[in-house]
Amino acid sequence: MLVIPAKNHNIETIKKALIPHIGKTVKIKHNLGRNKFETYEAKIIKIYNCVFLIELIKNKSIKSFSYADIITKTIKIYE
């Protein structure tokens, strides 16, 4: 199930949708272009004004994504 539904959204609605998932495990599908995808199992650890941070379950590294990545459908977040 998508955490952020595919409808009209802006940064504020995306933040509100992500807040209940802080600390929970989610799956993130990252579109790298040219039909290349990476899938991460991660925890959302922090939400900032322009970006949010995730911690990968596999190797405990931290990645950041912007809310624009969700709007442009570069990433999709699943429960």
Image (cartoon, rainbow, N blue to C red):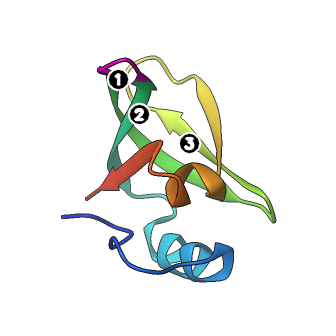
Residue at 56% across / 42% down in the picture? 54
Point out the tag, 2 or 3, that comes first from the N-terminus: 2
Which residue position holds label 1? 38
Residue 13 falls in image quadrant: bottom right
Q: Is residue 74 above or below residue 49?
A: above
Is residue 36 shown in magenta? yes
Residue 31 percent coordinates (x, y): 40, 31
Q: Which-is-in-front pick, marks 2 and 3?
A: 2
Q: Which mark is residue 30?
A: 2
Quarter the C terminus occupies: bottom left
Question: Which amino acid, by three-letter code, is at mark 1?
Answer: Glu
- Which disc, if any, is residue 17? none
Residue 59 screen position, x and y as percent: 46, 17
Circle 2/circle 1 CB separation < 8 Å: yes
Instruction: Residue at 44%, 50% (x, y): give it.
Output: 73
Q: Nearer the viewer, residue 5 or 39?
A: 5
Q: Residue furthest front?
A: 34
At mark 3, the secondary structure is strand
Query: Considering only vertical position in the picture, is 49 above or below 8?
Result: above
Q: Which residues are the magenta region? A: 33-37
Question: Which quadrant of the structure image shows residue 57?
Answer: top left
